[in-house]
Image (cartoon, helix red, strand yellow):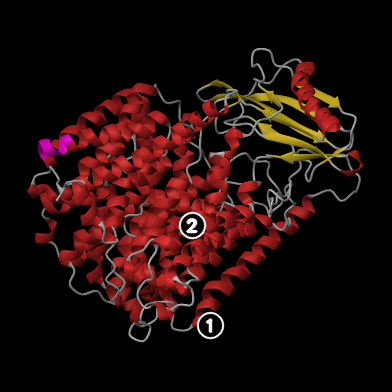
Amino acid sequence: MKGFTHFISGIAVASFFPQAVHMASQEQSFILCLGGIFGIMPDTLDFKFAKYFHKSDFEIRPDPNNLDARVIAETVANAIRKAEKEGRGTVQLHTMQLGSNLWRSYTLAFDSATSEVVVDIGPEVDTGQVPFEGTELKDPEKAHARVKVESQFFQQFDKKSQIAIMTGPCFEFVKRDEGKIEIVFLPWHRTWSHSFTLGMLIALLVGIFTFFTVPEGPNPELYSIPRWLLYPLIILFGSMVHIIEDSTGFMGNNLFYPFTKDRTNGLGLMSAAEAIPNFLFVWTSIICILYNLDRFRWAPGDTPPGIENPATYFFWFYAIPVAVMAYFFFKGKKAKEAKEPKEKGRPADFDAATSVERETDASVI
Amino acid sequence: MAILEALLNPAYLDLFYFTALGVLFSCLISFLPALHIYNVIGIFLLVILKFEATMAPMQLIALCIGMIVGYSILNTVPATYFGPGDESMSYYILPSAAWVAKGRGFESILLTGVGAVGGIIMLAVLAPAFLWFMPGLKTITSPHMFWILGAVISYMVLSEWPKGISQSESCWENFLEGWKFLGVGIATFLLSGLLGFIVMAKTLVPIEFAFQSITPVFVGLFAIPWLITNIINIGQIPKQHDPESIELDWGLVCRGTFGGFLGGFFAAYVPIVTAGVGGLMAGHATAQRDGRLFVMSYGTCKTVYYVGSFLLFFIPGLSLTRGGLAWIVTPVVSVLTLKEYALFVALMLFAAGMAYMMLAPFTRMCIWIVEKIAYFWVSVIALIIVIPAVFVFTSWGGLAIMTVSTGIGLLPVMFQARRMNLMGVLLLPVCINMAGYGNDVMRFLGLI
């Protein structure tokens, strides 16, 4: 899901605490923002910290002056061979910057039907990934390579990875049951940072701190939760909602790190980059926030409500927009299915549209 | 019948005349290089022309409607070719510059125009609904505006991702390279916020030009760094293609308009939030990725932000003053009824139609200018006009503020950080003040 989706979902979760809404309206507290900050925190930890400290077994820095697809494919294959022997192998692919707005592109794919690593050197592109005509390699031997490996491998999606601009992707190869190699995209992403364990640990530490530092606020008899407990709970639920939302996608999370070693697959209901699912979560959050701000307003007997009839509110502002979104979502899905070839057992079509994007862009994943 | 009679009432024809005049004025205003619309309108209406003394209130409002609608649609053209005047334009300009560099500037402007007209149509269609739900929305959100701004700031800062492309074997070297961009972004936000506190507490601008006190800040933060960049970096722009048609379908129009409307409405409703910030959030909320979608959506966002914030002022009984133009006309407006609101919507549609028809010839004229005169000289001339203009209206004090602002405004340009962070100049002090901590901060800074 998009960072914004997680952010606003975190605020929505925080707004379910009446005391937090009262603190915001009566004591000018920014406590509701805490939900948003911890809603986006798991991705912040990954893309601003974890990414830099992940060490790969193999690093590919192609030489733009001596391009050879086979060298790249062989290095990737070596990482797979390492996984065959030792259980795990990782490879980091780097981009080739030729100028301030000029890059040499290449693609990497895994053909699971033939157990081959497939590399193609592409044209030069600008930072908007627009290719420059006539910059393709002339020598087909250097431009294209397929390298076979011993083991069979599998991944959730047969999709080419385009390595062109900014930072290139990282892959981990993990030996699974029956000797098959699983291909894991961005192995440093959605691991410890996207676990219930970390959420609970941070909440525990914050809880200890607030227990000793946050005094009871005015009118404690109105609330069932003491004020010091509010902070860790908002942090915990803010980060939990991020993990739950990510679980609806394909990549999944490592829910109980360090007790579990690997990411579990997501439910595959939607892709992180899809517009309608993202907006559904955003809109649901907005509707919840407005409803909660209104129903938990201070002194409801003395101040008129903004939402006079909740049923009308939910009908016009939630049921109808969700129905419209559902209509367009399923219409789009049908259209996509109609375009896909029907026959089974076909060779992998790396250029086909899939329901997931291989993105290294933090704002998408 | 009553509606028809009201519409055909010749007494209202003068309003259409003044709206048309406003649209024509907006061409001229949008040509003034790198100046913010509200300041320019303020100068025109109050200082130079003293219009409020000679015009009926509704005539003045009609003129303003023409100016703001025309500006929101036509300003894209000179901003694309000569440089942005404010943050709302800066957000669009970087992607738009890529189109210009490919000779497709005309196409990007037409897409923006389609988005802008889509936004105006959505505003008109939803105008009756605003009467129904805006009072409720205001009741709910009024006590919470400060933390909503706080959330906007948090998201702006947290959603900037590292851009470093270091491929060193040292993790720390890569980490520091990535964080260099983030660090500059955060520093830019904090420095501009500090500048905002200083300018709001102790401005150097003479008291008679107090309403222009923010002009040198915006010129320094956004306009001059852009012009300097142009002078240093850019040679002649490539020949611009004049397309016979643009590639567009209804799906794209609907998605672009919808996403842009959300961002524009959010920016229009929440004080201090601009179209750039609203557009960023709406773009992320609707997961926009297509380049054409972005450009069109931006057209909607910018227009809905400028025009919508003025429209909100006219909702009877709501008293929602958002945007500089609403503040400018406040002294001349006594009572607002449904009649004025309906007239606003009609004049807005008229102005949008007129401005859209002027878009293509206006673009051709700008292209003709940049093809005849080297881009370098266009930027130099713009710089030569801007600096004396700031001096005329804000004196030496304004120039001093502009110089400091330029230093801060150059930071994101040099380090490729988000220019949006410069909005800290308004977001940070206003958010802190709304939360009631403004005096504490100013006391801490020694400003009071």
Q: Amino acid at mark 1?
A: Ala
Viewer-proximal residue among A227 and B228 = A227
Pointer 2 chain: A
* In the depicted structure, whether residue B265 falls above or below residue B139: above
* In the depicted structure, whether residue A315 falls above or below residue B427: below
Picture quarter containing residue A202? bottom right
**Secondary structure of residue under mark 2:** helix
3D distance between C-alphas at marks 1 and 2: 38 Å
Tell which tag, 1 or 2, sits nearer the viewer. Answer: 2
Residue furthest out toward the front: A212
Please report the bounds of the magenta region as a residue range: B395-400
Residue positioned 56% across, 28% down in the render: A126
Mark 1, residue position: A311
Left of B353 or right of it: where is A194? Answer: right
- Give the label on residue A206, or none: 2
Q: Amino acid at mark 2?
A: Val
List x then y, in percent, for residue B19: 27, 58
Left of B221 or right of it: where is B180? Answer: right
